[in-house]
Image (spheres, rainbow, N blue to C red):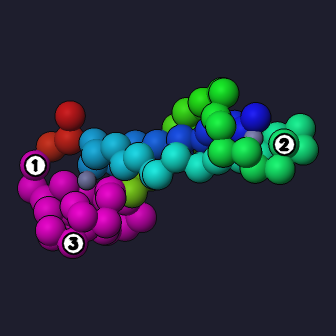
Amino acid sequence: MCHCLIMITPYACGCEVEEPPHLIESCGCGGCGIAVVTTTSKVTANQPCSACIESGIWTYATGTWKLNGRPRH
Ligand SMILES: [Zn+2]
Ligand SMILES: [Zn+2]
């Protein structure tokens, strides 16, 4: 039986991006494709997501990301 791993990245902008589920073969099952355990792993990114960066509302200055003119909550 396989292990399903879901990676969620919470970004500094407040967006959470979920990766497509990833199946990991376990105990030599040969990659049966049947997920019995699902693990969600969250790794916080210290930068805004690419969509927010592209939208231009975030600026990078002196080593930190700042939301243009507006205070962060
Ligand atoms: Zn399997
Ligand atoms: Zn974002």
Q: Position of residue 40 (x, y in %)?
A: 55, 33
Q: Is residue 41 left or right of residue 25?
A: left
How far is mark 3 from mark 2, CA to CA? 42 Å
Lower sequence index among marks 1 and 2:
2
In the image, what residue type sits under mark 2? Cys
* Residue to which mark 1 is pinned: 70
In the image, what residue type sits under mark 3? Glu
Q: Position of residue 37 (x, y in %)?
A: 66, 27
Lower sequence index among marks 3 and 2:
2
- Please, what secondary structure does the residue beneath circle 3 have? helix
What residue appears at the point 89 percent right and 38 percent down from the top-left corner?
27
Q: Look at the numbered disc 2 and say if its residue's Cβ is closer than 8 Å to ligand 1.
A: yes
- Please, what secondary structure does the residue beneath circle 1 have? loop
How far is mark 1 from mark 3, CA to CA? 17 Å
* Residue to which mark 2 is pinned: 29
Q: Is residue 3 above or below residue 31?
A: above
Q: Is residue 58 magenta?
A: yes
Instruction: Indicate which label's residue lies in the foreground, 1 or 3.
Output: 3
In the image, what residue type sits under mark 1? Arg
What residue appears at the point 83 percent right and 50 percent down from the top-left corner?
30
**Mark 1–mark 3 contact, CB under 8 Å?**
no
| Magenta span of residues | 48-70
Q: Is residue 46 left or right of residue 54?
A: right
What residue appears at the point 15 percent right and 70 percent down from the top-left corner?
56
How far is mark 1 from mark 2, CA to CA? 52 Å
Work out whether residue 30 or residue 73 is closer to the camera in this orientation and state it: 30
Q: Residue furthest top?
A: 37
